[in-house]
Amino acid sequence: MEEPIRFPVEAPGGFRAVLKFTAFRNIWFAQLAAQLADKFLLFSLIILAFKISGGSTPVAITLLTYTVPAVLFAPPAGVIADRMNRKQIMMWSNFGRAAAVALIPLAALVPGLRNDFLHLLLITLVFSTVGQLFAPAEAAVIPTILPRSALITANSMALLTMVLTLVVGGALAPILSRIDLYTPYWVAAVLLIVAGALIFASDIPRLPPTTEPPVAESRSRFRRMLADIKEGL
C-alpha cells in the first residue's frame, strides 16, 4: 500500500520560531532590504521617466525595460542558481544592483546625461537583469537551512515581504523624490549594500563537493548548465 503524501505543516511558533535560525534571519532581512530597494526603484523610475520626458510613452517603455528581463532571464537564472555558489550569487546580485542604482544619480551629475532617457533605460535593464539571479538562489537555499516543517512559514514570510515592500516603496518613493529627485536611488543603493552584507555574514551551505579536479569540475558544471538552459528554453 502506498504511503500518503505528507505535506509540510507550518512551523510551531510561526514567524518568531523561523527567525531563530540565524542563516534564515539574515537572508530574510536581506530579502526585505533588497525588495524594498527594488520597489523604491520601480516607483522612482516612473517618476523620473515622466520628469525627463513629460509623457506616458517613455514611462511605459521604462516599465517594459524593467519587466522584460524577468521573462527572458528567469529560466537561465534558475539553472545558474542550481549549479553555482548560491551565497556568492545572492551577495553579488545585491552589490551589482547597488552599483547600477548608484549610476543613476551619478550620471545626473554629468550635464549631457542628466536628462538623457537612453542611459536610464540601459541602467534599468542592467539592474533588472542582475536582479533575476537573487530569487532562484534564495529559493534554492531556504530548504537547506530550515527544517521541512518550517518551509510553509518561510514561504509565507517571503510573500508578505513582497506585498509590504510594494506598499511601503510606493508610498515613500514620491515623498523622497520631493526632497530630491535622486534621493530614492541613494536609499535603494544603501539598502542593497546592507542586503549584500547580510548575505556575506550568513552561513549558507555550499554545493556538494565532487571528486573531479577543479578545472574539470568547472567545465562539467558549465556544460550541464548550458544543457539545462537549452532544455528549459
Image: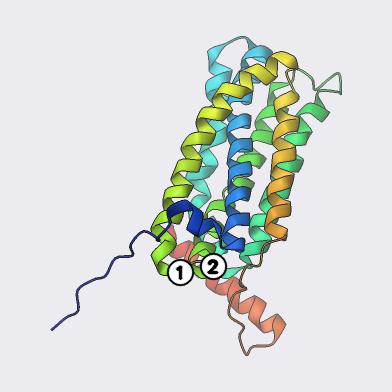
Residue 207 visible from this viewpoint:
yes
Describe the element under mark 2 as helix, strand or loop: helix
Res. 147 mark: 1
Identity of the residue drawn at 71% across and 51% down = 196
| Residue at the outermost right position | 110
| Residue at the outermost front position | 13
Find residue 210 and report its horizontal and vertical position in percent.
61, 85
| Residue at the outermost top position | 54
Find residue 78 and report its horizontal and vertical position in percent.
51, 59
Residue 76 visible from this viewpoint:
no
Identified by mark 1, the residue type is Pro
Instruction: Please identify the quadrant where the N terminus is shown.
Output: bottom left
Find residue 35 and report its horizontal and vertical position in percent.
58, 41
Describe the element under mark 1 as helix, strand or loop: loop
Identified by mark 2, the residue type is Ile
Instruction: Please identify the quadrant where the C terminus is shown.
Output: bottom left
Res. 145 mark: 2
